[in-house]
Amino acid sequence: MDHEATAAADARRRIARTDVLLADPRLAEAAARLGRGVVKAAVVAAQRRARAGEIPPDAVAAAAVAALPATASGLRPVLNATGVLLHTNLGRAPLSDAARDAVAVASGATDVELDLETGRRARRGRSVLAALLERVPQAEAAHVVNNGAAALVLAATALAGNREIVIGRGEMVEIGDGFRIPELLAATGARLREVGTTNRTTPDDYAAAVGEDTGFILKVHPSNFRITGFTRGADVAELAGLGVPVVADIGSGLLAHEPLLPDEPDAASMLKAGAHLVTASGDKLLGGPQCGLVLGHGDLVRRLARHPLARALRVDKMTLAALEATVRGPRTPTEEALHADAAARLAQAERLAGRLRDRGLDAAAVPSEAAVGGGGAPGVVLPSAAVSVPDGYAARLRQGTPAVMGRVEDGRCLLDLRAVPPDRDADIAEAVRLAAS
Ligand SMILES: *Cc1c(COP(=O)(O)O)cnc(C)c1O
């Protein structure tokens, strides 16, 4: 054995054993907090690095401590600097502080189905349902399920099992990741009765299709694409009098009209126009947790809520808590980002870029265009501002702590500030500094 190989073998022998390392007070404390498996994985990875000669044998414990995750979950926080407000891959809407606090409180034992006054069983989620009805007085009743797709499945099963759902051909939408609303509906056993054409569908098309076998008419908001040109659609108001329920899938979850997004349908307006039921997602423009909302006529909502399938689609106590805090609470981060002032964001980008240039880094403030994303407001451009840094930083920013997700455009990495809370400037600056080093 030559001298180098002997030294390497010697170093390997000096790497402490796993059980010895796990007895290190810092790692023992972490094991109590995060679980032994999580800590052991960090220890084994650090030993491997020492064996490969990347770190000295006596640095294994410190390396394991440094590599410990913040929580026992593999999910890591990400600063969304993509300029896409509702980024599906980043979990759509970030929760408000009010909603996070509510989740933390509800995560223990909680009175979700108990009346503490009488000591008797109470209606699950009664306070969030009340909150929804306060915000949407046009609805007689509300029900919450696991997501927007679940709301549609429940409506199709409870109101159109083995019967027909009348739907316009221009509204046969793919939501994303290969999931298609027509296929989802067909999977429930309901039959689709397609009417009209891709670009033009009239109220008469619907009227001609409605009959004995109709469960309901479904209006689906084309939330992630636009058809323009020679087009005609039928409004909810034009269909409400055909003698069958009209279900409006609005997607985005806006409870009331949002002037910044004039073409985006909302629950209150749809019900006012005569829709019998509205279905929507909780984690799009509503800015809450993943869930599906059903709002509308009391008898129809009750049919859905009492259907056996409802039990399989019900949400947990933490979702109920987050949803109520979203509905009752202050502006959500999504609303803040939507209403952000572009000029203020540009000033913020200039301050940030200036700070980075002061450290000798290649950074510039540039105007940028943000989007709602996540199946909402297609084609709407939200003026924004970004900090432009070399595109080589993108991967290191993604893998930093916290992870920062920007977008690469024309050979630069743009950190768009529209969806970044203003109080996270220092984190962005620090992340860029680390990515550059
Ligand atoms: C997003 C969307 C859905 C699906 O909602 P999920 O909460 O993702 O299940 C259904 N319909 C429309 C119109 C949508 O935009």
Image (tube, rainbow, N blue to C red):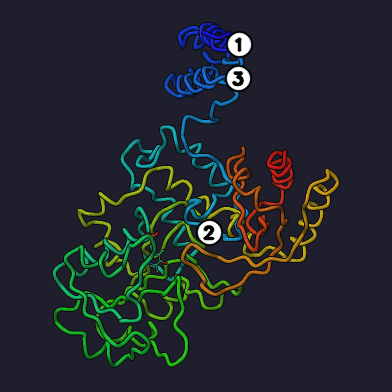
In front: 58, or 79? 58
- In the image: residue 55, left or right of residue 72: right
> Circles 1 and 3: CB distance less than 8 Å?
no
Quote the CA–CA distance across marks 2 and 3.
41 Å
Mark linked to residue 55: 3
Q: Is residue 275 above or below residue 183?
A: below
State the residue at coordinates (50%, 74%): 264
Label 3 neighbourhood size at 10 Å, few (<14), some (14-19), many (20+)? some
State the residue at coordinates (72%, 56%): 387
Looking at the picture, how far across and down is residue 165, in whole percent? 23, 75
Please, what secondary structure does the residue beneath circle 1 have?
helix
Q: Identify the residue position indicated by label 2 in the image.
A: 86
Which quadrant holds the C terminus? top right
- In the image: residue 278, left or right of residue 164: right
Of the residues shown, which amino acid type is indicated by label 1? Asp
Quote the CA–CA distance across marks 1 and 2.
45 Å
Quote the CA–CA distance across marks 1 and 3.
8 Å
Q: Identify the residue position indicated by label 1 in the image.
A: 58
